[in-house]
Amino acid sequence: MPKENHFAQEVCDMNLRQVQQSYIFKLPRILQIRKFRDLYNNKPQKQLRIRYNVPIPIFAGMIDTLQADLDDGLLLKFEAQDPADNKAAIKANAAIQKRSTSMMPGAQWNEKFRAFRQEMLLTGRGFLTYSISNENGYLDKLEDLAFEDVFFEPKGGGNFEDHLFQMRSNVWMTKSDLLKGVANGIYNKEQVDKLISMGGSEFKVSNYWDNYDFANRFMSLNLTPESNNYVGETMFQFVEAVSTLKGQRWYCLFEAFSGTWIRFEKWTDICSSGLYPIMSAASHRDKKNFASKGFADDLYPVAVAMTDMLNEDLENRKRRNSNAKGYDKDMFPNIQQLDQAQMGRDRLVMMDTKGGTRRLSEGIYQFQTPELTGTIDVLQYLESTAGRNFGVTDLQQGASQEASKAVGVTYQELGQVAKRLAFQSQPFIEVGQQLGVRFFGGLKDYLREPMAIKVLGEDGYQWDFLKRIDLNLKKDFEITVTSQARENS
């Protein structure tokens, strides 16, 4: 085995162990997030001795309200720090506008931002990954990732860039993809041949440390992914890893089951800035704990309590309307006739009063279920308290204001909402800045041919070209990100 391949296998083996340890570390958190996703999808919770099991969509409603509040497309803008770079800034801004709004699957940035926010609200962490290639011309790709698919250093802290490794799973490729990559000089031919000789599968089957999430997202909506994962073409699942060893960051793409690597390079040869490809933001950042809590952690207990209370009240009403009864078998010799009379109309029931010496009330006893009171009041209290504490008020949800609510109180709530939105949108702004750095770095690394762009001139928008020479700056750009929620505050 060549020396470089021996080192690649050493790093690959290390990565495989790292991803397994990260999986063990975050599995309890994944199981908790699974409950959040079930409740968001209105999957009924298990109940004991209660016939009613009706989910209340308050949890999904509050998550969706927060999502709507923060649904503000990020606008990235490069600002020149030297007059000589003004034209380059104009062209770079035109390029980012073109790429972010393109209809290519790897573009459509606003769609990715929405998915990023949704994941952050539910799990506490949102993830975006940005990659660039130049196989058939300049092509960049922005993807949103699920918490379950991202692996991190357990004690790496709240800043992802400080971790010794980061990885993503569920990277699927076909046999033809691998052969194409070999032909383009991207994948190692010897390693690809070795992997193909092992045989793939025409089913999308996850490895053992990824199975915990494979079916759950489908099952909460009563789908059966285990029996419907046939794709008809040989597939392989990979893990994409960037890790630090011997003072360098290394990129390794390896097959998830066997640990067979197919691409291994020094990371700076792929991304000259050396920055990790995966960006992340936390809704409730913890300096030492990367897997910090999210809004769902606060909302979930309240939503479960409200669901339990409603179902208890419905069960109480059911039992009060159909309480159990006791009867005297001597007074009612035909029990079947008596039982049918409880559900029918104008029925005759044979009874023996012992010649009129016993009353009907002495032969039948109805067990009483005490009435539950105050349920509605408690539900309203929990909802309003949760709304105030989590920033989801009746004002934000579009409800009409109570007649007793003074104008001053309403304006005060508007001010609180504005402050919350400014605070909650800050993580998105920070991720937008990280994305801007990677976008400009990608242009410098992979822009080989001039990119056609539209810039605003004296006669309106005109065609121009962004060339690689335009990216030679006197001073680095300042990257500003504007958020609609923050602007409105």
Image (spheres, helix red, strand yellow):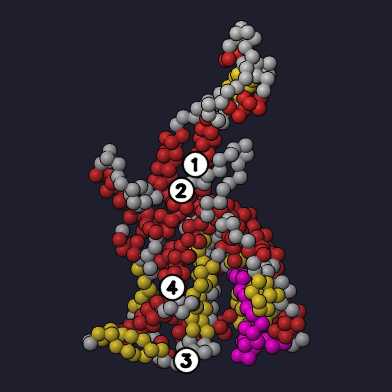
Q: Mark 4 falls on what kind of element?
A: helix
Above or below, comparing residue 382 to residue 233 in the picture: above
Report the Cα–Cα distance between label 2 and label 1.
9 Å
Residue 385 on image: x %, y %: 42, 42
Q: Mark 2 falls on what kind of element?
A: helix
> Which residue is more in the foreground, 257 or 344?
344
Question: Magenta region: which residues?
Answer: 166-190
Residue 275 on image: x %, y %: 52, 75
* Side of 90 where 48 appears, left or right: right
Residue 109 image label: 4
Residue under label 3, please give it: 448
Q: Amino acid at mark 2?
A: Ile
Residue under label 1, please give it: 306
Q: Is residue 107 magenta?
A: no
At x 73% / y 74%, what residue is drawn? 258
Q: If the image is split into quadrants, where does the N terminus sit?
A: bottom right
Could you tell which of marks 2 and 1 lies nearer the N-terminus?
A: 2
Report the Cα–Cα distance between label 2 and label 3.
52 Å
Residue under label 2, please give it: 58
For the question of whether residue 20 can be seen, the reply is no
Could you tell which of marks 2 and 3 lies nearer the N-terminus?
A: 2
